[in-house]
Image (cartoon, rainbow, N blue to C red):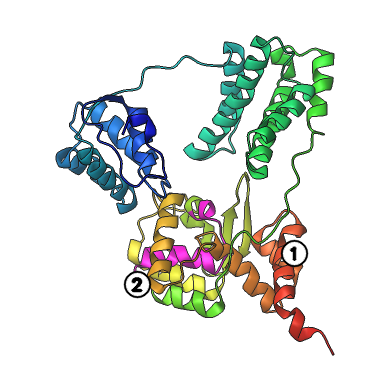
Amino acid sequence: MKLQQISRRVEVTPSVGSAVLTVSQLINYFEASLKKPNNYPRIARTYVEYCLNNHFGMDAVSLNFYAAGKKGNLVSPVRKFLKFYVEQGQPQVVLDPPTASKISPAANELILGYLNDATHLRGDQSRENYTKALNAFFEYIEIETKSGRSASFSSRTIGQYVNFLRTKNLSAFTINFYLSVIKQLTVWVIKNRSRLGLSAEQLEDLHEISGIRGLRIERGFYKDSLSENERTALLASIENPTDRAIVALLGIEGLRTVEVCRLQVGDVDLERGQLWVLGKGKHTKKVIKLFEACAEALRLYSIHIGDQATKNTPLFPELKTAQIRYRVDKYLKALGLKRPKISAHSLRHTVGQLLIEKGIEPIHVQRHLRHELFETTQFYIKKQTEKEYLNKMPD
């Protein structure tokens, strides 16, 4: 079987031992051998590049160096990769050749200028996603221009670009994200119009971009939620003080994973029963009620870490969202609660659903979860209505 014949549907991968592969080629073959790749290829690529840059062999010795101080969820994919690599005869691997930029220097400078000022992009993954979205748009402009078709950073071209993305069978969520990023770049360009030397005609056209509509998404309950008994069992099963505090913040307070990572020691006011949260994409913190069950978990955690931290110290140093998801999944699986629509983010949905079930005013639920739109809070009301409908309707 030839190398090109590998696909995710095959269960037996061919030997590539006699080949000289680039990093991307090797990782593509590794990904094709996995039934559910998840983030395994990305983590394996990091390890392979680490070995090549340090002139290490890809073996148990380099794995020990690479794994030092890393969490288990960043090491187990590498172990699986090494097993695959050995099965393929340990082919020679070289770094990918440098690729020339597909977008013009002017567009690249524009993107870099925007990203440099985009203080709301706090994580590397967010910056990477925004860069990918903007590069894709300007690559589209380059391709259209080289093909003899009119294209520019304008409302007309962006409208055409949205239609182009629809032909690529991308989800409505992805298309709307790409459009949102372009709109944010547009706002930055308008703000810096003097420095960029925009004409009045260009400025007028850029203002029209804000009116471009994204694709309509039929909103539903994309994440399931736990029952109150399941949530209680989950928290009771966690002995580690750090993990228990993290899960309490997710499943009792309803914080997003990124919000847990951003918490500082000074954001927790145990005496007043308050918690200051820096929301997703926000620049200022908002205070919410700190429920006693969560406060107790945080007290136990504070005893565990001692009194060395200052108010500006991260509450959970070096914690990443991926680590939270890994830990939550581990506890969910141990209790048999892991289901297709249950994840770390489901704990936030659990909070919203249980507050509605307990009769808390929806406007207060919206305030606690910090939903910008009341429509988002109404999903919980709608779900509760569906559950109660048959019993509540009179004969």
210 and 269: which is toward the camera: 210
Predominant SS of the magenta segment: helix
At 36% from the left and 17% from the top, the residue drawn is 97
In the image, which residues are magenta?
240-260
**Residue at disc 1, secondary structure:** helix
Magenta-span inclusion, residue 261: no
Q: Which residue is mark 1?
A: 378
Q: Which residue is mark 2?
A: 239
Mark closer to the observer (1, 2) = 1
Q: Is residue 391 left or right of residue 105?
A: right
**Residue at disc 2, secondary structure:** loop
Could you tell me residue 76's position as x and y percent?
29, 50
Q: Residues within 10 Å of mark 2 (few under 14, many from 20)?
A: few
Amino acid at the residue labelled 2: Glu
Magenta-span inclusion, residue 256: yes
Query: Disc 1 or 2, which lies upstream in sequence?
Result: 2
Q: Is residue 207 above or below residue 343?
A: above
Amino acid at the residue labelled 1: Gln
